[in-house]
Structure formats: structure tokens, C-alpha cells
Amino acid sequence: MKKVAVFTSGGDAPGMNACLRAVVRTALYHKIKVVGIMHGYDGMIKDEFIDLDAKSVANIIHRGGTILKTARSQKFLTLEGRQKALANLQKHKIDGVIVIGGDGSFKGALEFSKICSIPFVGCPGTIDNDLIGTDFTIGYDTAINTVVEAVDKIRDTAESHDRLFFVEVMGRDAGLIALRAGIGVGAESILMPETKTDVADLINRLKSGRKNKSSKIILVAEGDEAGGAFAIAEQVKKELPDFDTRVTILGHIQRGGNPTAMDRVNSSRMGFAAVEALMKCEKSVMIGIVNKEVAYTHFENAVKHIEKLDPDLMRMVDILSL
Ligand code: F6P
């Protein structure tokens, strides 16, 4: 392993920079050259390769976003795009690649491995935490803390006006942001794609739980099958017109901001482990942290979305909510 390339891909996540810093510094320690690829797979196709040294990653551990920029590449979905990307990796004499991204990025790497024998290792960079093979993805802890901070503020105004709030959080396919942040803010209900949302039942529970608390906060994952926060709030308003109801969509605020200490530490461990995995001739594996230990999961298994939620956690959510 003489030269590795590293890039970030998919939605940015706080901690991607910390991971990149660890990759660069670990590789340099082992006398391996490092190049960064700007704009994810798009940059691999367009030949946006830049040399990285220890200084290029100075003072980035605390910064959200990604200094390498990122993209959701449409061109890489085509064989022609992948062929161009391969030609560029060969031109730059790359011996191994580290991709920091989510399941789409790993699916892309898996497809690429059909024509490209250069090994790829992944670090799970997504705020959604929807990957098998790691307890926490890069950015998840920061995102749920951002949600908790925002919803605590919403709780103040909800409590002052005796209001019902529907707060929509990110999670196109997964409700894990809604779940943990919902527990953290003491949400009265958490609606996510992994569990069946019964709006009639929610209405009944809102009616009967009304005496307990003057404010109510329902966290809705954007991918919930009953629709987004606005759609569900409309249905509830029809049945409960005397509730003073409001909707807040938190949106991309959840993807930004300085990474938490936990995200910085996990990201650093993953970047460090990714370089060592390439040195051990691993390929097509995602680095995760499972029960505090570094773990490898083949891309094929890592991409599967977690649909089974911890039943004990779900029982607790039920007991503590409305
Ligand atoms: O990367 C995951 C995610 O945060 C999803 O939860 C969300 O649906 C999506 O990104 C939004 O992506 P974009 O910024 O491309 O609209």
C-alpha cells in the first residue's frame, strides 16, 4: 500500500472531517501517500484529485460538513461513469480507497468492485444511523443532540401556550434520529417508518393523555409511512379541533454544526482503523464500532437498513410516552 485515496460521499455528516484527519495522519505515519478526491464519486469521474499532507487536515476535527465536499453522484450510477472513475484511480496509481459515506456510497463501491480490483474500505458517514455493522454512524450523535436542543426550545413555547407540536426530523428510510432524540426530549409520541403509525390510535391517546401535561410533542421521522408532520397534523386537527396545533420541520439544521465529542472520537477511531484495514488487505468492508470494539462488516451486509428495533427500548418508549 503506497498511495491511498479518500473521499466523502452522500449527505454530509458532522465528524466526516475528524475521520478524514485520522485517515490522513494514520496513512502518513505508515509512510503511505494520501490524495483526497473532491465532490465524492463525481470528483473521481472528473479527476478532482488533490494531494493531502498533515497540514491539510489541521484544525478540522471540530468542524461540521466536509472539507472534501460531497455529492450524490448520478454519473457514477452509469457504467461509463464508473469506467472513467477507474481510469482516474489508475492514472493516479491508487492502491486503496477509503470512502466515508452512507449506504448509497457503499452500494456504489460494491457495484464498482465488479470492474475495479482496487480495494475499497468504508467509514459509515451518515446522520441517519441506518447501517448494520456499527452501533453509531458518524454524525448521528451530533444530529440527535441538535434535535434535542431544538426541541427543548420548542417545548418552552409549547408549554407556555398549552400547544401540541408535530416536529419532523430527518430520516428518509430510518426513524433512528426520531427514536433517540424523542426519548431524549420526553416526546409524547414517536412516529417512524419502522413501526406502524396508527393515526386513529394517536388521536385517542392524545385525548386521554391530555390531563397529564399541557404541552405535547410528537416527533415524526420524515420517512414515516403515514406522511410527514404536516400531513399527520392535518388529520389530527380534523379530529381534535380544540387542540392548538403547530408543525415544525427541523430540516438541514440537523446535518450541520460542530461534531460532539463522541462523534469526534468514533470518527477518529474509524478513520484510523480504515487505513489499517487496507494495510491488512481487507476490501469491501465497512469499519464500525460494535460494543466499543472496531468491527468489519462486508458492504453487502452493511447496506441493509435496520428495521428491527430493540424491543426493550420500544417497550420503554411506550411506557414513558403519552
Ligand atoms: O443522508 C441522509 C439524510 O440526512 C436523510 O435523512 C435525508 O432524507 C436526506 O439526507 C436529505 O438529503 P438531501 O440533503 O440530499 O436533500
Image (cartoon, helix red, strand yellow):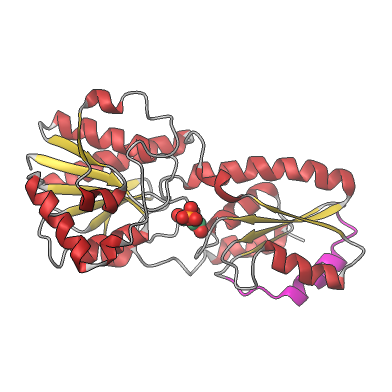
Label tally: 0
Q: Is residue 128 visible?
A: no
- On screen, residue 194 above or below 171: below
Quadrant assignment for the C terminus: bottom right
Q: Is residue 201 visible?
A: yes
* Residue situated in front as seen by the camera: 161 or 262: 161
- On screen, residue 106 above or below 251: below
Is residue 14 left or right of 191 when viewed as pictured? left
Residue under the image location 29 percent in, 59 percent down:
106
* Residue situated in front as seen by the camera: 73 or 223: 73
Is residue 178 left or right of 261 when viewed as pictured? right
Give the x, y percent position of residue 266. Answer: 38, 40
Is residue 224 left or right of 26 when viewed as pictured? right
Quarter holding residue 270: top left
238 in magenta: no
* Residue situated in front as seen by the camera: 199 or 184: 199
Give the x, y percent position of residue 226. Answer: 65, 73
Quadrant assignment for the N terminus: top left
Give the x, y percent position of residue 254. Answer: 55, 46
Residue under the image location 18 percent in, 55 percent down:
85
Residue range in magenta is: 195-214
Residue under the image location 37 percent in, 45 percent down:
292
Give the x, y percent position of residue 53. Answer: 20, 27
- On screen, residue 242 above or below 148: below
In the orientation shown, which residue stands out farthest toward the right? 242
204 in magenta: yes
